[in-house]
Image (spheres, coloured by chain):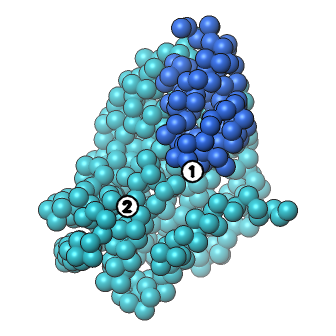
């Protein structure tokens, strides 16, 4: 008997992937060169599988802000927010986020994952019910579990299924919190947020939206999909991350609820962890300024997304959702997905390989994500390699033609 | 049949039908069949199965119960207890 016995199915699964000649969990970026380039396996590679939507990781003003903080405030706070870990930058960042989103208050966490843990576990308790979208991110599932609330899943992106469940629960006199994301990372599909907002408003329950993949991507100043749809008043809580469009590390929760800040004294994932490093904090403040001031970054991102979407569909690939900065290419089976992922990498293109059980409905996916920093030539190169591989995969007589 | 009239036998019959797609080796599904070992129902499949059962009986089964769902008997118990409480 061994503590690790329970992981036998995972070891078997990992062994199967190794047998197929792929080890996506141990891919190493040997040297990062820019938001869109790195050395991988000794080759210069175009990065088309990061969340660096606006390419701000190498922005000179963002770097300068981080360096200034590093030199003047040190490498870390070495303390939690409720002890010695609250610097003027943390307060300034929270004010900046609240102002950016038009919310009364914002609370910053050291990672996006912790933001969901802290906000969900803080908001809900064992007597409450959380209704969550079936395809929610792991951090949402774990945050809900940590809260101790009763967890009920509804069908992915289905306001009708949520409505049905809320009707069934109507007589239960407990707090109900609905949790959805704006953009789902696996398929790149967008939630019908306005329809969800109508359902939650009609039933008088709270709505939390995770804008991890939509912040900086939607809205006239990049505030997210909630702002783009003009449904701010129907969304009670917003969660987001700094590790995508904002090019840093960290996360936040924001709300207009007058008691929201009590989470600072009740949410353990906020209270009992070291606060975000000063350089991260100052980098995010500068990144928000940049995305507010430079709408061209969003335009460039969407141009790139539309361009690659058109090129991939012209080749004959089947994409899982309408155009978004995440383009999930559907593969007919695991063997083909692994073959194509390896071939792309050998040809200097990195995308994400996503396989069951981590994908919805057992899908096998090559997941490309775009950046405003991709040049038109890089998009053309990515599509060109995809085209070559489609041809080769067909020549190899894969079980089904790639993506068709 | 309304949910108030459900019995363990009627619920089991429905659950057994819903388990058939997870039964490639055509094992005889009984109340104590091991869902993971004998039917290949992993944690993801279990969540899908729960949703199908919810639709069939028009009730909600909290996924907090999942760690305790190992056999069809556990699913039957979950349906009966939720039918009672809803």
Q: Quadrant of the C terminus of chain A?
A: bottom left
Label 2: few (<14), some (14–19) or many (≥20) C-alpha neighbours in 10 Å:
some
**Residue that appears at 55% across and 42% down:** B26
Q: Which chain is cyan?
A: A
Classify A111 as above or below A73.
Answer: above
How far across and down, in percent of the image, does residue A130 sit?
Answer: 59, 31
Tell me if B61 is positioned left or right of A330 in this view: right
Report whether A293 appears left or right of A147: left
Identify the residue position indicated by label 2 in the image: A333
For this orientation, the residue located farthest to the right is A1
User: In this picture, is B42 found above or below A155?
Assistant: below
What residue is drawn where x is 55% and y is 24%? B14
On residue A138, which mark appears?
1
Give how far apart the Cα atoms at labels 2 and 1 are: 24 Å
- Label 1: state its secondary structure: helix
Q: Residue A360 at x, y = what percent?
A: 44, 48
Callout 2 secondary element = loop
The quadrant where residue A54 appears: bottom left
Q: Which chain is blue?
A: B
Q: Is residue A182 visible?
A: yes
> Is there one chain holding both mark 2 and mark 1?
yes
Quick one: quadrant of the N terminus of chain A?
bottom right
| Chain assignment, label 1 | A
Q: Which mark is residue A335?
A: none
């Amino acid at each position: 008997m061994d503590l690790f016995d329970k992981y036998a199915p995972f070891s078997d699964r990992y062994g199967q992937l190794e047998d197929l000649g792929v080890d996506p969990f141990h891919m190493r970026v040997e040297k990062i060169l820019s938001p869109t380039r790195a050395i991988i396996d000794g080759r210069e590679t175009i990065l088309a599988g990061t969340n660096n939507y606006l390419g701000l990781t190498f922005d000179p003003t963002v770097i300068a802000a981080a360096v200034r903080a590093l030199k003047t405030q040190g490498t870390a706070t070495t303390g939690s927010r409720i002890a010695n870990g609250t610097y003027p930058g943390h307060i300034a960042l929270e004010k900046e986020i609240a102002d950016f989103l038009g919310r009364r208050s914002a609370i910053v966490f050291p990672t996006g994952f912790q933001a969901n843990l802290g906000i969900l576990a803080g908001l809900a308790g064992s007597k409450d019910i959380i209704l969550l979208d079936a395809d929610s991110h792991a951090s949402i599932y774990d945050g809900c579990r940590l809260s101790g609330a009763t967890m009920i899943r509804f069908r992915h992106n289905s306001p009708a299924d949520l409505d049905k469940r809320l009707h069934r629960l109507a007589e239960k006199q407990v707090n109900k919190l609905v949790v959805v994301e704006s953009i789902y990372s696996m398929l790149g599909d967008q939630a019908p947020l306005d329809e969800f907002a109508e359902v939650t408003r009609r039933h008088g329950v709270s709505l939390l939206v995770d804008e991890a993949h939509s912040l900086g991507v939607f809205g006239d100043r990049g505030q997210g999909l909630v702002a783009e749809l003009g449904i701010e008043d129907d969304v009670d809580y917003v969660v987001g991350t700094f590790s995508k469009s904002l090019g840093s590390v960290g996360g936040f929760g924001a709300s207009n609820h007058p008691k929201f800040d009590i989470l600072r004294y009740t949410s353990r994932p906020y209270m009992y962890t070291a606060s975000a490093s000063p350089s991260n904090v100052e980098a995010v403040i500068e990144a928000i300024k940049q995305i507010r001031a430079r709408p061209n970054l969003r335009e460039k991102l969407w141009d790139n997304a539309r361009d690659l979407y058109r090129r991939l569909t012209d080749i004959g690939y089947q994409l899982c959702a309408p155009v978004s900065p995440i383009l999930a290419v559907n593969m007919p089976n695991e063997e083909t997905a692994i073959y194509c992922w390896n071939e792309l990498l050998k040809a200097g293109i990195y995308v994400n390989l996503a396989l069951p059980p981590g994908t919805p409905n057992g899908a096998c996916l090559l997941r490309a994500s775009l950046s405003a920093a991709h040049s038109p030539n890089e998009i053309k190169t990515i599509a060109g390699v995809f085209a070559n591989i489609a041809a080769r995969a067909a020549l190899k007589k894969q079980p089904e033609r790639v993506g068709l | 049949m309304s949910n108030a009239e459900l019995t363990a036998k009627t619920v089991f019959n429905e659950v057994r039908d819903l388990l058939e797609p997870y039964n490639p080796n055509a094992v005889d599904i009984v109340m104590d069949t091991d869902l993971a070992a004998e039917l290949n129902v992993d944690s993801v499949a279990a969540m899908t199965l729960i949703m199908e059962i919810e639709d069939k009986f028009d009730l909600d089964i909290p996924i907090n119960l999942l760690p305790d769902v190992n056999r069809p008997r556990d699913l039957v118990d979950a349906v009966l207890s939720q039918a009672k409480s809803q």
